[in-house]
Image (tube, rainbow, N blue to C red):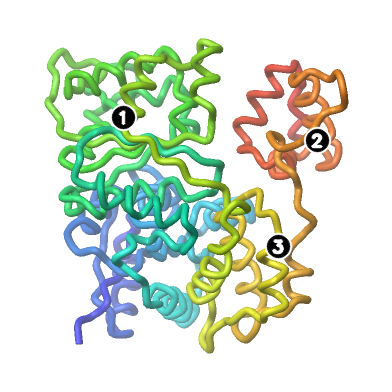
Amino acid sequence: MQQVTVLIVDDNEVQRKVIEFNMAREGYAALGAGTIHDALLRISEHRPALVITDVMLPDGNGIELLERLMSLDPGLPVIVITAFGTIRMAVDAIKKGAYDYLTKPFEKEELSLVVRQALQGREQPQDTTRFGIIGESPAIKEILGIVQRIADADAPVLITGESGTGKEVVAQAIHAAGSRRGRPFVAINCAAIPADLLEAELFGYAKGAFTGALKDKEGRFAMADQGTLFLDEIGSMDIGLQPKLLRVLETGTVERLGDTGTMQINTRIVSATNADLRSLIRKGAFRDDLYYRLNVIPVNIPPLRERTEDIPLLARHFAAAYAHQGGLVISDEAMDRIVHHPWYGNVRELQNFIRRIAVFKGSGTIMLQDTAANLPEPVVPLEHQSSPAGESMDEAEKRMIVSALEKSGNNMSRAAQILKIPRHKLIYRMKKFGLKRPDKSA
């Protein structure tokens, strides 16, 4: 029987060797890495079934590595460990896809238990012919058909849909279904990186290109050479950077910051957005020529509330993935409640809801009372809310933001959750309307 491979990422060699030794005693094939760079090399070579990573690493931190791993394989269990345990860091790790979070020092039995539970969820049977796309609705069947037809075409793909609908899952399916599947799938969220840093992240830079550029850095385009580059939230890309992306699409070449030469690349571009790019074009915030270059093959994912027949399949899938030993099933009454919830946060909201129940319940049957305790009244996202007669869109947005801040006690993250928009978009809109950010000390 083939051993299950576990990768331990920690720059403290003594601590890493101790965990490797304990994992080997548990019967796993244990690998070690001291940096994010080495970890990514080990992952490409050995395809581990689970990753254990420290937070503090020489070339970044474990949360950054976690985000990279989630873009490569959202189903890969990642356990984050650190000596600097804070609630904020723990929540951040879980929100970004970590299976669990342990604070050093911890008992070896504690880690062993978490590893076993994580791998049990990983080993749930999956229909690999569907490339991770779950659903039986006509919309999902159509998307699966599109994925199969366009997988080997190198033309750019633009995936549209609300937040949480699974745009990255579809992008990964396109990559996995085609001839590039053995090559890297590299993802980057254009809204999560400040505009002045996104260019360096995409194109890379040469040593000395700017203050702090102490060594050459490979950009995401180069990382994805021969593979696929997924540009999430492309509508958030700064208008000044868009011509440089357009040039890459037109010429197939990349120029690092501070470098006079160009590099030829063979990278398929798949982008995604929850924004109306045509509206952004009319406002002058997005280039029409770039839009037409990206939108060669359009794929739209409908919101979950418009394909309710997919909800039971997804709910059972997440219940199986997050259940502790003994399994987790959903009663008919609870499923009826789940199906009739509007799920404005789409698949992501449903996934987090099931995971929350699994954390507290562990195994057994999800009953109607479990859903009532863990499923709050639906909060209508900003873009779906109605306005009083005569109120302009800007006035409505400002009123809703002020209301959300009041309800949250001026907690920015909670206000963003109430409005069902990312925190960075809340900050942008507050600046737009001249609303001051709450005092952090308050």
**Compared with residue 364, is residue 102 higher up or lower down, i.e. above or below?**
above
- Name the residue rendered at 26%, 49% in the picture: 175
Kindly identify which residue carries mark 3. Answer: 340
Left/right of residue 289 with respect to residue 101 in the rendered view = left
> Label 2 sits on what residue type?
Leu
Q: CA distance from mark 1 to mark 2?
A: 40 Å
| Residue 208 showing in the rendered view | no
- The x, y position of residue 351, in whole percent, is 56, 61
- Image quarter of residue 50: bottom left
Callout 3 secondary element: loop
Left/right of residue 164 with respect to residue 384 in the rendered view = left
Crowd rating for badge 1 (residues with CA inside 10 Å; few <14, some 14–19, many 20+): few
> Label 3 sits on what residue type?
His
Kindly identify which residue carries mark 1. Answer: 296
> Label 1 sits on what residue type?
Val
- Say which of 40 and 187 sits in front: 187
Crowd rating for badge 2 (residues with CA inside 10 Å; few <14, some 14–19, many 20+): many
Kindly identify which residue carries mark 2. Answer: 405
Q: CA distance from mark 3 to mark 1?
A: 36 Å
- Say which of 350 and 5 sits in front: 350
Callout 2 secondary element: helix
- The x, y position of residue 128, in whole percent, is 30, 67
